[in-house]
Amino acid sequence: MSEEGETVLDARDVAVHFGGRSTLFGRPPATVRAVNGVDLVIRRSETVALVGESGCGKSTLSNAIVGLQPPTRGSIAIKGRQVVGAGRRALNEIRRDVQMIFQDPALSLDPRATIGATVAEPLSVRAVARGGELKRRVAELLTQVGLRPEHATRYPHQFSGGQRQRVVIARALALEPALVVCDEPVSALDVSVRAQILNLLVTLQKRTGVAYLFVSHDLSVVRHIADRVVVMYLGRIVEEAEREVFFAAPKHPYTRALMSAVPEADPVVQRAKQRFVLKGELPSPANIPPGCPFHTRCPLATEICVSDRPELTPRPDGARVACHHA
Amino acid sequence: MSVLQPVRRFRPRLPRVPLSIMLVSAIILVIVAVALLAPWIAPADPLRQDLLGRLKPPGTVGRTGVTYLLGTDDLGRDLLSRILYGARVSLSVAVLSVLVSTLVGVTLGMMAGWFRGWTDTVIMRLVDIMLSIPAILLAVLTVAVLGPGFLKLVLVLGLTRWPRYTRVAYAQTLQVANLPYIKASELAGAGAARILFRHVLPNIAGPILIVATAEFGLMILFEAGLSFLGLGIQPPSASWGSIMSVGRQYVERAWWIVAFPGACLFLLVLSVNVLGDWLRDRLDPRSRIR
């Protein structure tokens, strides 16, 4: 299924490191390796979920993909055009094809701009439309996300969280991008509103063929929306698989730990479930353990894990896993 | 807390303006009106001297039959007329210099906060330098070089007071610049100028308004100080500050020369501060619905 369709995102060996530059006084601070060599390909109409605990580099990677955070190394191509090293003008052209939906809808809308002005901004800045045509396009976009055209004159504080996220989606889709990076788009919303927003995203994808990079730490949401799941740990991908394979047969011990942490609705199942508990804390990305970065917390770890870092290797069912033992 | 609260919500939504705000607005309006209408409402020529009728208390009837409602100054000029004319000078100096320093200060502050890097370093170190030079000394130097005059006074005040706005605008911009809606605007393709003036400025306007209203009062006082040093408004024209500066010497014999312009100044500055505080809250669209 992932074979057909044009490639929308092609990221190769992306790394984002922070700090480490020597200062005037004292020793340079330790380099924080937020993203440390990630390969990621997303095709048209595909939804790829990026999961992992906070601090694993999910958000940094998404920022790098939309060009808000220049990577230290590697290449990121959106529909064949290179984001890394692109000038302002080139970047603006690329951003027609890559937009972002943020986690907190309360902070993603300018409180002093009307909804109409916010949704119109991508169109008016690029002179795609103006005057009556612009108004018509804004009304159309608002209708598409389930709002009414007359909402255009209102301010963000007059809307609920779910409605605000609809506005954010309308703005992201205004330029008909090929890829939308969704940075935990529903985690700040009420559970009752989540399904609505997720369904809206799915509907819009069917209509426009947009691809989503769906950053989340909520596996139930991921199961609902993703075609493919990518698990990150300390700046690296540790497992990548199609949704069915991923949920039926998680392989990496870290993935299994994530899965076993999801509570089951049925208490009998919940009690019978084999718990896969991790010990210790997430190591600091400024001080990543040698060998397999996960060995400090892994229940399966042996000597080889301390000395050699496992590469992502394909498995018979199509999954790719970075583990010596799984 | 009682469960039964008076049903207030259903009142028609009238623009509810507190009494205090109406009062201070009225004071400001009156002062502005008086300044504009000074030539028509002043009872006497503010420059005409009457050395025999100097330092007369309020209510004295002069030899020409004019009643000096607020008394006369050290040269026998009608204090009321001088205050009316002085309002023009004081107001326009304060308004214009606040505008100049806001414009300069906020623009630089936003640039420093947005571009960071060397822009930040250069602008913020300049601010530090400006703040470490006594403003009055700088003003004295500038006027000594340029010579006194109304416009020069405005420029001197405006260009010595901008660092405060820069500091506030800088700190606020740093905060706002990392919010997702600014990032979204960047992703939408907006350039720095559009982001700063369309998205950052409206969202940092509140604190800047507070600084501006506080500075407004300071500007009037500053102008008074400069005029006192002979570097501001040149006699015989008057501002509230210069009237007070002169009256200071006679305060034991003629309290009114200092008291009346001082009272006007106090009322104006207080009113502007109260109004500015209220405006800041009102300008926030989130509070508009209340």
Image (spheres, coloured by chain):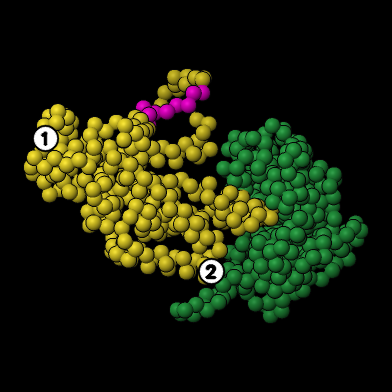
Work out whether residue A40 or residue A152 is closer to the camera in this orientation and state it. A152
Q: How crowded is mark 2: few (under 14 residues within 10 Å), some or many (20 or more)?
A: few
Q: Which residue is drawn at 48% across and 60% down?
A: B108
Parent chain of label 2: B
Q: The green chain is which one?
A: A
Left or right: residue A7 compared with residue B110 = right
Quadrant occupied by the C terminus of chain A: bottom right
Query: Which residue position is annotated with label 2?
Result: B117
**Residue B81 sits in quarter:** top left
Query: Which residue position is annotated with label 1?
Result: B57
Q: Report x, y in % for residue B156.
A: 36, 58
Asked whether residue B78 is in view, the answer is yes
Q: Give the range drawn in magenta.
A: B13-22
In the image, residue B126 above or below residue B183: below
Residue A129 shown in magenta? no
Q: Report x, y in % for residue B71.
A: 15, 35
Q: The yellow chain is which one?
A: B
Parent chain of label 1: B
Q: The disc labelled 2 sits on which kind of residue?
A: Gly
Q: The disc labelled 1 sits on which kind of residue?
A: Pro
